[in-house]
Image: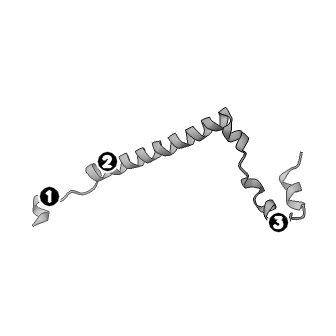
């Protein structure tokens, strides 16, 4: 098994394919059951984080932000 040290000591590969090797998309994985579940989990995670952020901002504006009183408006 190759370690990180062995990979570091190799001469660099040439070309665009060598640069993009770590970013390849495995289409067979994404179309498998595990891939579909991963995609669904990511989408719901993004939605959930967005809802929490919006809710936290709304609570901050209504309860934590200083409100203008009658004396301040005049």
Q: Nearer the viewer, mark 2 or mark 1?
A: 2
Quadrant where the N terminus sits is top right
Q: CA distance from mark 3 to mark 1?
A: 66 Å
| SS of the residue under disc 3 | loop
Q: Residue at x 27, y 49 (%)?
A: 63
Q: CA distance from mark 2 to mark 1?
A: 19 Å
Horizontally, residue 50 falls left or right of residue 15, namely: left
Q: Nearer the viewer, residue 22 or 7?
A: 22
Q: Nearer the viewer, mark 2 or mark 3?
A: 3
Q: Are marks 2 and 3 in contact (CB under 8 Å)?
A: no
Percent position (x, y) of residue 27?
A: 71, 44
Percent position (x, y) of residue 50?
A: 44, 47
Q: Quadrant of residue 38?
A: top right
Percent position (x, y) of residue 25?
A: 71, 49
Density class for disc 1 (Cα within 10 Å; few <14, some 14-19, many ≥20) is few
Horizontally, residue 31 falls left or right of residue 58, namely: right
Q: Residue at x 32, y 49 (%)?
A: 58
Q: Which mark is residue 45?
A: none
| SS of the residue under disc 2 | helix
Q: Which mark is residue 15?
A: 3
Quadrant where the C terminus sits is bottom left
Q: Residue at x 61, y 35 (%)?
A: 37
Q: Which residue, given by chain and number where applicable, does mark 1 sit on?
A: 69
Q: Is residue 8 above or below residue 62?
A: below
Q: Which mark is residue 59?
A: 2
Density class for disc 2 (Cα within 10 Å; few <14, some 14-19, many ≥20) is few
């Amino acid at each position: 098994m190759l370690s990180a040290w062995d990979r570091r000591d190799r001469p660099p590969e040439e070309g665009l394919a060598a640069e993009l090797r770590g970013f390849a998309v495995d289409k067979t994985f994404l179309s498998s059951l595990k891939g579909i579940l991963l995609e669904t989990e990511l989408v719901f995670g993004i939605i959930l984080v967005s809802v929490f952020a919006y809710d936290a901002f709304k609570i901050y504006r209504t309860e934590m932000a200083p409100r203008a009183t009658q004396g301040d408006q005049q």
